[in-house]
Structures are given as C-alpha cells and as structure tokens.
Image (cartoon, rainbow, N blue to C red):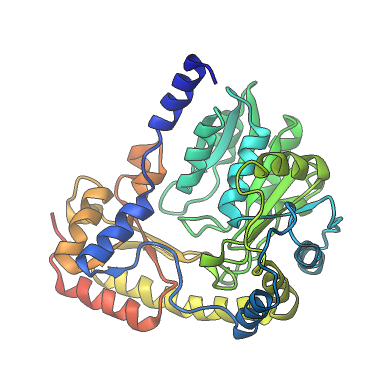
Amino acid sequence: MTPRTSARTAARLAGIPPTIFTEMSALAQRTGSVNLGQGFPDLDGPASVIEEAAAALRSGRNQYAPGPGVPALRQAVARHQQRHYGLELDADTEVVVTTGATEGIAAALLGLVDPGDEVVVLEPYYDSYLAMIQMAGGVRRPVTLRAPDFRLDTDGLRAAVGPRTKLILLNSPHNPTGTVLTRDELAAVAAVAIEHDLVVVTDEVYEHLTFGHEHVPLATLPGMRERTLTLSSVGKSWSFTGWKVGWATGPRELVGALLGAKQWLTFTSGAPLQPAVARALDEEPEWPRELARDLRRRRDLLCAGLAEVGMDVRVPEGTYFAITDVAAYGWGDGREFCLALPERAGVVAIPAVAFHDDLEAGRHLVRWAFCKEESVIEDGLARLREADLRA
C-alpha cells in the first residue's frame, strides 16, 4: 500500500464514529442502569439447539468449517427460503454462511461497491451500514423515513438515484423504526432497481418478528430474484445473538462477490454452531412464532408505559424496537436526553439521531428495546415514571 493510498484509507476510517451501541451499553454497565437500548434478549433460544451445539463441540467439530459454510446449514437455509417464501436456491452456489448478518453486510458492500459508487440507504440506518459504505469507498444517498409514520417516500427514493448509483441497501423489517415495508412500497423499490439496473442488498434479520404485518422478501417480486442479495441470521428470530451466525442468499454472481470479500474477513467461523443453526431452521419453526407473540405483549407493555410518561410513541410493526419523540422534554436532541437519562432515571436508551444524515429528522427520536423480560421493562418504566425527564 502506498503512503497516498494509506492516507486516503485513513481519512475514510477517521470519519467513522464509534458505534453508539458500545457507548450506551458501557454507560448502562457503568451506572447500573436498566438497559433498554441495545437489542439483545435476556433469554436464550431453544434448548435443543444449544444441545446440538454442545454435541458438536464434544464430537470434534472444532476446526475450520468450509469457507461458504457447512453443507448442512447451507442446505437448511435453502429449505427455509423455499418453505417460507417459495424461493428455490442451489445450496452449493447460492447460499453462503456469514459471521452474523453484520459480516454479510460488510462483505456485500466490499464485494459489490467500488470507490465512488453511490449506495441508496433508508435512514435512520443501522450504524454498520454507514461504516461499511465508507470503508468500501462508497457514497451514501439516504432516503428518510420520517416521523410519525416512517413510510417509504417513493419520490425521494427515485430522486436519490443518479448515474453513479450502484446499489440499494434495504432493511425491512426496519431497525430502528419498526416499519415493515408493504408490497406496494417494495414494488416501488423493485421498479427503481429494474429501471436503473441496480443491485439490492436486503437485510431481513427480523423477518419472523412482525406483529400482524406480512414480511415480503424483495427477492420474491417479479424481476428481483436475479438482482437481490438477501441477508438474515439466527440471532434475532431464535434468540442467539451472541452466536453470530448468519447467511446470504441470491444469484451465484452476487453470492460469489460477497464470498470473495468474506474470505478476507473471517474466512469462516462458528464451526460447531453451524450444525446447531441448521437444526434451528429445520426443527424449531415454532420458536420464532412464539417469540413474536411474546414480543408483541412486551411491545405493548413498553409503548403504553412510554406514552404514560408523556412521550410520543410510534407502535412498531416488527423488530425489537420502538421509537419515541422526546422533544416535549426540552432537550436539544435525543443524544443529550439519552446521556442524561442514566443519572436522571437509571435507564439507558439509544438516540436515533446517531442513525441520520438528516439531523433535523432524527433530532428528538429515541429508540427503546422491548426484547427484555417483562420484569426488566416494568422496572425501567417504573424508574422513568419516578424521574424528572425535563431538561
């Protein structure tokens, strides 16, 4: 690497802020606050899946797995996509196992985006999107989902596409707003992608965690299978976030581009966990359904409690998260509010302004996680009720 290239790379990386999740979770730990910020559940996934992983550990499955993933898991992912969505995949060439969906996003962007390429992304965006677009040398073109409804602005989507646009990075069910894109909204995305010959990378990690709203994979729409790279993982829907096992599916050219980058990231990971994840997909189909039903109760508990203390709450259609507007409390922005909250109330939340280019759109929005035990949510709400939340 030449000094000039090194300097350009350093400049790109210097512009990437630390992840807000690390900052706020450390604050929760340091202050002993109830963590309603970071989206990890309090309870583990199915015991049978844990036992499968333990058996793999004991039986010598502890060395490198194949770079694309163990065949059993790639085949289970292909069956999952066919069973749920009618998508037929070649498990050998159209499925790759990743170190969580986060690595899938990284490898997709590094494999598909060249310096100067533009990437259209919905905002508020998950913060790793911003980081990886910058690391790939790409230029982000955000399309804002605006309060209070957080629906897709199809005119804004069309306006964001220009001659240098290479890719759309789509997230539905959407973190952090909880929006589940409708068929009509997805059809608008498909129309833009086809018209401009764009690739679409879809992050669908919350695919099974919706509340009375249908999740439709973009790849199922006419003309989209051949231009869509779909990412998901076991972490959210089966409550194994710490395992970091995900997958990418799509046409072999797109999967191959992702794999070409992935081989220089982790190459492979989680060898004894991969057969266990295959078991989750094949033999624990009820777990995500039960989890979604349980999350809906916790969502309602949290949203009602946040409304009770005077916040403007948007009830989410999916995911682990609810968004509130805290402007009425008089803080300059949601970050100021969230930094003061541990001392004021002993609670931690996430400022959604960290996920925006349009700072005004996200200025007073705060994200709350309801993937916690009801007793934890109740404790957090009790603390909020007793606190002075005004600036």
* Residue depicted at 75% across the width and 56% down the height: 66
* Residue depicted at 20% across the width and 45% down the height: 332
Which x, y percent locates residue 331?
18, 50
Q: Quadrant of residue 256?
A: top right
In the foreground, 160 or 219: 219
Which x, y percent locates residue 169?
60, 42
Which x, y percent locates residue 373?
40, 80
Query: Can you say whether 57 is above or below 250 in the image?
Result: below
Name the quadrant of the N terminus: top right
Q: Specify whether 299 is left or right of 122.
A: left
Can residue 141 be seen by looking at this rendering?
A: no
Which x, y percent locates residue 196?
72, 29
Can residue 261 be seen by looking at this rendering?
A: yes
* Residue depicted at 39% across the width and 62% down the height: 38
How many numbered dots are placed on residues in this image?
0
In the foreground, 379 or 245: 245
Q: Quadrant of residue 206?
A: bottom right
Name the quadrant of the C terminus: bottom left
